[in-house]
């Protein structure tokens, strides 16, 4: 009789053989470990109606499959996804037409086999959920486009509105939230419309908040993305500006980098895999496609590994380490639709080379927005 160990080894060898022999498009990634999700939007060509779509991989992107989502997501777009583990995932959605003031937080605790839409609290300014950050099976944070901050400590059975006030009791109002991140008790939110004071930070789990000053921000611009490596180290980027702003003292002081990678396009996502290494997904401004970059920042100077991904505008990035990362983006509108609407890319050599992963035919028209893997920084 074959032992359990031998059966495992035989199955593994067979999987490797099948992967080596299988055909496919040039540049499509072959199997590697990793459980992850991507979120985006599918729009009906006839009706123009949008709906949220989520895809999952159980094998590092060798195969992606569409998840079955609850009813009631019509008219919504996929904004954010946050993987806590291979079982626990939170997702954020908002209205395609923000005037309808609708949105949702989605949750799974069984690896995406079933998803639920959670109840949002009353009294929200905006129900368009722009970002979410899962901490555990029980705890998560979220923020709406209009500046509502939400927290749950019971797995989303109840979400509470958080009172965002400074140490003097004054309300800190936000009007255009785009991204958030959490590291321990520190919560970081970026409010684009607030310009140089658009980083809103709580160092104590949401009890008190402060607006932090970003130096040398061009008037009319504001922080679009933020990534917290730790309670002391965080990074931010401003819309239509290729610099990075960093803090190493918990947000007391921020400095702008000397170097820049673009002067006109947005960094739609940044994610720090180390205190001084930041991964970037840039949309390219819709003209020349987007790019990914792995930037090592030393005294404000960039050592950047940049890769262009025409015709895809890169929108999300999720690094596992300083060497391994996934990125997603969707095709420019000006390009004829002979390619999938979106691309999922993976690198295992620190961004020197990226390889496109294979998507199912049912997802060829899904515009992917954000990506998150189990074990990744975000």
Image (cartoon, helix red, strand yellow):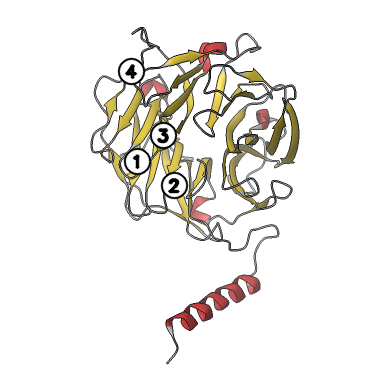
Residue 307 rendering spot, x and y as whole percentages: 73, 41
Q: Residues within 10 Å of mark 1 (few under 14, many from 20)?
A: many
> What numbered label is drawn on residue 174?
none
Instruction: Answer whether labels 1 and 2 touch (C-beta < 8 Å).
Output: yes
Q: CA distance from mark 4 to mark 3?
A: 17 Å
The image quadrant where one finds the N terminus is bottom left
Q: Are marks 3 and 2 in contact (CB under 8 Å)?
A: no
Examine the image and state in which quarter residue 105 appears. top left
Q: Secondary structure at mark 1?
A: strand
Q: Nearer the viewer, residue 127 or 8?
A: 8
Instruction: Answer whether labels 3 and 1 touch (C-beta < 8 Å).
Output: no
Q: Residue at x 37, y 27 (%)?
A: 205
Q: Report which residue position mark 1 lands on.
A: 106
**Residue where numbered disc 2 is placed:** 54
Give the percent coordinates (x, y) of residue 19. Answer: 60, 70
N-terminal label among 1 and 2: 2
Image: 141 above or below 219: below
Measure how far apart labels 1 and 2 are at the Cα level.
Answer: 10 Å
Q: Earlier in the sequence, mark 3 or mark 2?
A: 2
Residue carrying label 3: 132
Tag nearer the camera, 3 or 2: 3
Of marks 3 and 1, the one in the foreground? 3
Judge left or right: residue 67 versus residue 291: left
Distance CA(mark 3)–CA(mark 1) = 10 Å
Q: Residue at x 70, y 46 (%)?
A: 351
Measuring 40% from the left and 19% from the top, which residue is drawn there? 147
Task: Please report whichever mark, 4 or 3, sits nearer to the chain's N-terminal start.
Answer: 4
Q: CA distance from mark 4 to mark 2?
A: 26 Å
- The residue that label 4 is drawn on is 125
Q: Secondary structure at mark 2?
A: strand
Q: Is residue 109 left or right of residue 252?
A: left
């Amino acid at each position: 009789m074959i032992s359990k160990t031998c059966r495992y080894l035989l199955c593994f060898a067979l999987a490797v053989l099948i992967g080596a022999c299988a055909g496919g498009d040039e540049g499509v990634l072959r199997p590697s470990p990793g459980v992850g999700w991507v979120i985006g939007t599918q729009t009906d060509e006839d009706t123009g109606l949008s709906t949220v779509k989520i895809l999952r991989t159980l094998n590092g992107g060798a195969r992606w499959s569409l998840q079955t989502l609850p009813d009631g997501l019509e008219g919504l777009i996929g904004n954010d996804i946050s993987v806590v583990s291979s079982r626990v995932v939170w997702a954020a959605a908002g209205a395609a037409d923000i005037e309808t003031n609708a949105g949702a937080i989605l949750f799974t605790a069984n690896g995406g086999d079933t998803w639920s839409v959670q109840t949002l609290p009353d009294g929200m300014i905006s129900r368009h959920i722009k970002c979410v950050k899962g901490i555990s099976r029980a705890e998560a944070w979220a923020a709406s486009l209009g500046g509502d901050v939400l927290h749950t400590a019971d797995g989303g059975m109840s979400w509470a509105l958080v009172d965002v006030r400074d140490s003097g009791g004054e309300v800190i109002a936000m009007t255009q939230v785009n991204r958030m991140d959490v590291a321990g008790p520190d919560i970081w939110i970026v409010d684009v419309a607030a310009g140089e004071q658009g980083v809103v930070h709580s160092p104590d789990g949401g009890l008190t908040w402060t607006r932090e000053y970003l130096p040398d921000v061009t008037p009319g611009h504001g922080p679009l993305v933020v990534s917290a490596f730790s309670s002391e180290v965080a990074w931010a980027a401003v819309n239509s500006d290729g610099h990075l702003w960093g803090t190493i003292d918990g947000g007391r002081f921020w400095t702008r980098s000397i170097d820049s990678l673009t002067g006109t396009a947005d960094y739609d996502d940044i994610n720090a895999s180390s205190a001084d290494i930041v991964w970037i997904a840039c949309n390219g401004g819709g003209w020349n496609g987007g790019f990914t970059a792995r930037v090592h920042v030393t005294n404000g100077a960039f050592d950047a590994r940049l890769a262009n991904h025409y015709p895809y505008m890169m929108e999300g990035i999720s690094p596992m380490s300083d060497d391994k990362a996934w990125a997603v983006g969707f095709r420019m509108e000006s390009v004829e639709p002979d390619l999938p609407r979106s691309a999922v890319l993976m690198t295992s050599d620190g961004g020197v080379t990226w390889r496109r992963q294979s998507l199912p035919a049912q997802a060829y028209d899904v515009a992917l927005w954000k990506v998150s893997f189990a074990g990744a920084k975000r």
